[in-house]
Image (tube, rainbow, N blue to C red):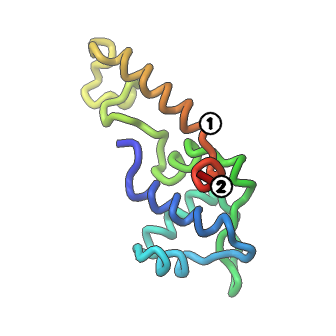
Amino acid sequence: MLLTRASEYALLSLDIIRNAKEPIGAEYLANELNISQSFLAKILQNLAKAEILSSKKGAKGGFLLARPAEEISMYTVVEAAEGKAPAVFDCSQYLNTCPNGAIGMCSISPFLSKFQGRVNKFLIELTLKDIYEN
């Protein structure tokens, strides 16, 4: 599955954070979005590790975009939020992640690889600016 709640929550949070002039905390975001603060905090930390967000500690701490929205690809957001590269199908075109270890015998493997490549290209080219300014 390409997008889970983790990606959805990341995008919803980034929509709020992108316009912030001051750091925004996980508690505020969780309340604003009516979602689990502990789950959201993990997502935000992953976004910070991927250098999508910058994190500030302290009483006025929280998160801000680490760079302009036009420099942050959707691929990077999904990869950070999900903790792995985006995949359209549970079945993968990669030998090490093929659920039955038979990638060489899979008749749809070439299609999966081509399809995933096109999705990856689209996600790499799509930026946060594109998402929020349409």
SS label for mark 2? loop
Could you tell me residue 121's position as x and y percent? 56, 30
**From this viewpoint, which residue is outermost toward the left?**
100
Q: At x 60% / y 77%, what residue is drawn? A: 25
Could you tell me residue 48's position as x and y percent? 63, 60
Q: Is residue 37 left or right of residue 66?
A: left
Residue underneath mark 1 = 125
**Which of 108 and 48 lies nearest the eye of the viewer?**
108
The quadrant in which the N terminus is found is top left
The reply to whether callout 1 and callout 2 are in contact (CB within 8 Å) is no
Q: Amino acid at mark 2?
A: Ile
Q: Is residue 4 left or right of residue 74?
A: left
**Which of 63 and 49 lies nearest the eye of the viewer?**
63
Which of the labelled discs sits on residue 105, or is there none?
A: none
Q: Amino acid at mark 1?
A: Glu
**From this viewpoint, which residue is outermost toward the bottom?**
59
**Which of 99 and 92 lies nearest the eye of the viewer?**
92
Q: At x 32% / y 13%, what residue is drawn? A: 104
Residue underneath mark 2 = 52
